[in-house]
Image: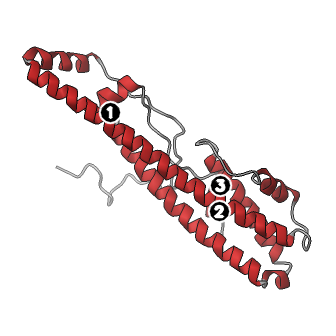
């Protein structure tokens, strides 16, 4: 029998294919079969029914803990984003009187002076705005080598690079936990039944913006 997926003979799409994260949450649903399954356990005796009841209790506890872990991982990203905001504010405060920054950069910084409390939906957007603002500042620095050479600015830029790496790592941890959640809520019978009764849905992992994707495809050299 031939291999179902044969990388030597194709078919191959020579044009390539781009991919995107689907922005859709899938609800967990169970059919009549799951109800019949539970009824059969009780019909077989009190012990099988009670055992499955405790299994569902443990499954609910597990999903609650996993849900808290998702929130914890998300908060880690928020912490790093808040630190980036502080660095951006410090940099802008130093250079705004020395160079002509784009007004949109100033608006972005001013928008977060009151603190960072992004929603799950707005976390990506906020991160993209911070990236855009920092890129604008970097471009402005190119015209002011003396300012760029200042120790305070150099330290701030180094901290920003460090936080960018930490945010990337935190996003990977977040996505891994989201993947675990999305898999476990469909683990039949116990977890799936519990998830369906609780009205749980899949979660959407971190997604890059169109702007970031376009920049990644650009020629760097």
Per the image, label 1 sits on a secondary structure element best described as: helix
User: Horizontal placement of 84 versus 150: left or right?
Assistant: left
Give percent across and percent down for residue 103.
Answer: 88, 57
User: Horizontal placement of 171 versus 119: left or right?
Assistant: left
User: Horizontal placement of 47 versus 94: left or right?
Assistant: left
Give percent across and percent down for residue 20.
Answer: 53, 47
Q: Tell me the number on the disc at residue 60.
A: 1
Which image quarter: residue 181? top left
Residue at x 78% of width, y 50% of height: 111
Give percent across and percent down for residue 14.
Answer: 48, 57
Q: Earlier in the sequence, mark 1 or mark 2?
A: 1
Which image quarter: residue 119? top right
> Vertical placement of 206 versus 200: above or below?
below
Q: In this view of the protein, which residue sits in the foreground, 3 or 211?
A: 211
Q: In this view of the protein, which residue sits in the foreground, 58 or 13?
A: 58
Residue at x 51% of width, y 56% of height: 171
Q: Earlier in the sequence, mark 2 or mark 3?
A: 2
Which residue was labeled with disc 2?
83
Give percent across and percent down for residue 98.
Answer: 91, 74
Residue at x 65% of width, y 47% of height: 117
Q: CA distance from mark 2 to mark 3?
A: 12 Å
> Vertical placement of 207 versus 167: above or below?
above
Which residue was labeled with disc 3?
127
Q: Crowding near pointer 3: few (<14 within 10 Å), some, many (20+)?
A: many
> Vertical placement of 37 versus 217: above or below?
above
Q: Earlier in the sequence, mark 3 or mark 1?
A: 1
Q: In this view of the protein, which residue sits in the foreground, 145 or 218?
A: 145
Instruction: Indicate which label's residue lies in the foreground, 2 or 3.
Output: 2
Q: Is residue 188 visible?
A: no
Residue at x 36% of width, y 25% of height: 196
């Amino acid at each position: 029998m031939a291999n179902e997926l044969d990388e030597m003979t194709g078919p191959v799409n020579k044009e390539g294919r781009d991919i995107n994260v689907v922005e859709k949450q899938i609800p967990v649903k169970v059919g009549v079969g799951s109800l019949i399954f539970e009824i059969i356990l009780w019909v077989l005796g009190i012990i099988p029914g009670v055992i499955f009841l405790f299994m569902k209790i443990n499954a609910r506890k597990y999903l609650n803990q996993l849900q808290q872990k998702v929130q914890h991982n998300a908060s880690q990203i928020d912490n790093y984003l808040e630190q980036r905001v502080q660095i951006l504010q410090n940099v802008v405060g130093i250079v705004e009187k020395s160079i002509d920054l784009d007004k949109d950069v100033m608006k972005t910084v001013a928008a977060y002076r009151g603190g960072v409390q992004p929603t799950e939906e707005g976390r990506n957007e906020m991160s993209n705005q911070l990236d855009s603002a920092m890129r604008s500042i970097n471009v402005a620095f190119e015209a002011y080598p003396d300012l760029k050479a200042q120790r305070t600015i150099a330290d701030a830029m180094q901290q920003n690079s460090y936080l960018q790496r930490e945010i990337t790592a935190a996003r990977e941890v977040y996505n891994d936990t989201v993947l675990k959640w999305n898999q476990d809520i469909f683990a039949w019978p116990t977890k799936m039944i519990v998830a369906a009764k609780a009205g749980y849905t899949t979660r959407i992992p971190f997604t890059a913006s169109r702007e970031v994707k376009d920049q990644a495809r650009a020629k760097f050299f």
